[in-house]
Image: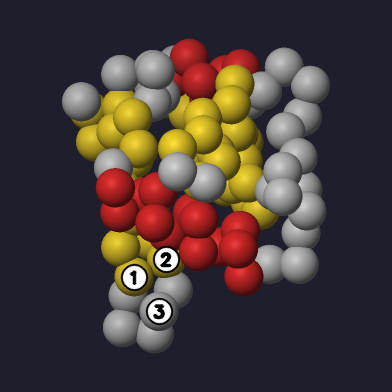
């Protein structure tokens, strides 16, 4: 299962708490394109999970994974940082 670092939890919580979305809002990671070499992922703020999404919730942060992304990210760790302008940047590491 994808592991969220404390910084990822903080950034996802900040994104959802500053939006005008309902309490079930979260960051959804989905497989945008797959190939034999890997998976291109997309991330977006959504108001709730989609049918079939895996739900990760930690200290108010909610991350939703579509089935393909969940399978690809099973052994990964998600972390985040803020760039100089305060824009969040997410990174994946093999855990």
- Tell me the residue that label 3 is attached to: 86
Identify whether 57 is placed above or below 46: above
44 relative position to 41: left or right: right
Residue at image point 45% right, 43% down:
59
Q: Position of residue 32 (x, y in %)?
A: 62, 36
- Judge the density around disc 3: few (<14), some (14-19), many (≥20) Cα neighbours within 10 Å: few
User: What's the mark number on residue 66?
Assistant: none
Residue at image point 76% right, 67% down:
20
- Judge the density around disc 1: few (<14), some (14-19), many (≥20) Cα neighbours within 10 Å: few
Q: How far is the residue under mark 1 from the one under mark 3? A: 5 Å
For this orientation, the residue located farthest to the front is 59
Please name whichever residue, 47 or 59, is drawn nearer the observer in this view of the structure: 59
User: What's the mark number on residue 88?
Assistant: 2
Q: Position of residue 74 (x, y in %)?
A: 39, 17
Mark 2 or 1 closer to N-term? Answer: 1
Q: How far is the residue under mark 2 from the one under mark 1? A: 4 Å
Residue at image point 66% right, 23% down:
53
Q: How far is the residue under mark 2 from the one under mark 3? A: 6 Å
Q: Are marks 1 and 3 in contact (CB under 8 Å)?
A: yes
Q: Are marks 2 and 1 in contact (CB under 8 Å)?
A: yes
Q: Quadrant of residue 55?
A: top right
- Tell me the residue that label 1 is attached to: 82
Q: Position of residue 28 (x, y in %)?
A: 62, 41
């Amino acid at each position: 299962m994808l592991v969220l670092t404390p910084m990822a939890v903080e950034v996802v919580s900040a994104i959802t708490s500053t939006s005008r979305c309902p309490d079930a809002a979260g960051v959804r990671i989905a497989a945008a394109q797959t190939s034999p070499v890997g998976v291109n992922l997309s991330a977006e703020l959504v108001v709730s999970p989609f049918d079939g999404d895996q739900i990760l919730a930690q200290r108010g942060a909610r991350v939703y994974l579509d089935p393909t992304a969940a399978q690809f990210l099973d052994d990964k760790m998600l972390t985040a940082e803020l760039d100089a302008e305060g824009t969040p940047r997410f990174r994946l590491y093999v855990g």
